Image: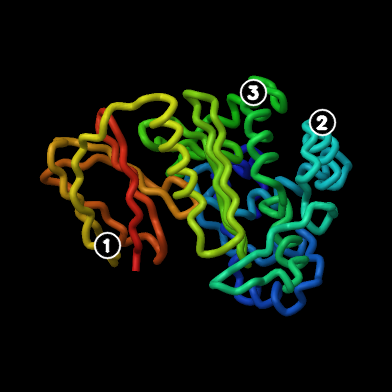
Amino acid sequence: MDSTITVRQLLNHTSGLSDVNIAGYPDSMLADPNRVFTPTEIITWVGPPLSAPGTDWYYCNTNYLLAGMIAESVSGQSFSQLLRDSILTPLQLDSTYLAVYESSSVVAAHPWQGGMDFSSTPRTSINSAAWSAGAMYSTSGEMAQWYKSLMNGEVLNQNSLNEMTTFVGLGSYGVGISESTILGRTIWQHGGTIWGGYNSSMMYDVQSGSVICVLINQLPAQAFQVAIQLLTDLVSNSVGFPEQNMKITEIYPNPTSEKVKIDLKDADVIFYEVNSNNGSKLFEGTLTKDENEISFSLLAQGVYFITLKSSVQSEVFKVIRN
């Protein structure tokens, strides 16, 4: 790996590193589901670099595995103990823990995927491989408490908060959090999935200071879409946005293999934002009545969300790329 990569580049995903994608990695997880993988083992499965450090943005769990290793080296503590001492105990997040390396009396929800209950399948190998990039268990209440404490300055000083909310790249990503405009609101958010049935979406509404947290124990799932609906309820009931008047009648074709066309009625120009199923912003732009197509040709098959924004309101549409 390039020795010039900085900690900041790891945390905002501009390191240029690729994710764990070497052939054989998934098979190794399932072949021995009780095995505890070390971070050193996992990063041997990292593919070739995608770009030079600091030149481009790619979301990559490798970055946070390396950041966890650095945190252990600097602190002299295990990552799980560092989290416990620095964050979880002070904030009384007693139901939140790092799987494999800690235990909890809280019973985890059964993970469902494809209509099957995977609760009898050991998750030691999967969770140890995810480690500092995504092996945390929690409750929606404690996640909401964590976000409120974080944003209210109870965890980081103002300089660190400013670093965290300095957003870069195609994903408009800061440090462990991304920025999106949803329903006309500035939202700081994150979400994700892990194999075997867990899907999450957390949103912080900058204007009101409200926190939305959705945890779902099945895949496929749309925690991001549920969070948007909750945000819609928040906006409609608490803030009182104007009546909808964009009058978009159709997005077609949907599903699509290449591009979608948006049929605009009253709006001359609208802005759009395309998000992945876990809420990450992929790209944005503007549409007019004459230039009203959005290309999906470079995106993988899956579910995406388009947020269309006029000067007075926003609408969110689900699009399937086949």
**Left or right placement of residue 255 versus residue 303 in this view:** left
Image point 77% across, 51% down: which residue? 98
Residue type of the residue flagged with mark 3: Asn
Q: Which secondary structure, mark 2?
A: loop
Can residue 53 be seen in this snapshot? no
Q: Earlier in the sequence, mark 2 or mark 1?
A: 2
* Type of colouring: rainbow
Q: Which secondary structure, mark 3?
A: loop
Q: Nearer the viewer, residue 42 or 273?
A: 273
Can residue 134 be seen in this snapshot? yes
Q: Quadrant of residue 124?
A: bottom right
Residue type of the residue flagged with mark 1: Asn
Image point 81% across, 66% down: which residue? 36
For disc 2, the marked residue is: 90
Label 2 – label 3 distance at C-alpha: 15 Å
Q: Nearer the viewer, residue 241 or 296?
A: 241
Label 1 – label 3 distance at C-alpha: 41 Å
Q: Quadrant of the C terminus?
A: bottom left
For disc 1, the marked residue is: 254
Q: Position of residue 127 (x, y in %)?
A: 73, 61
Image point 48% across, 36% down: which residue? 179
Q: Position of residue 93 (x, y in %)?
A: 77, 38
Q: Earlier in the sequence, mark 2 or mark 3?
A: 2
- Whether the residues at callouts 2 and 1 have beta carbons within 8 Å, the answer is no
Q: Residue furthest right?
A: 76
Q: Which secondary structure, mark 1?
A: loop
Image point 50% across, 30% down: which residue? 205
For disc 3, the marked residue is: 152
Q: Earlier in the sequence, mark 1 or mark 3?
A: 3
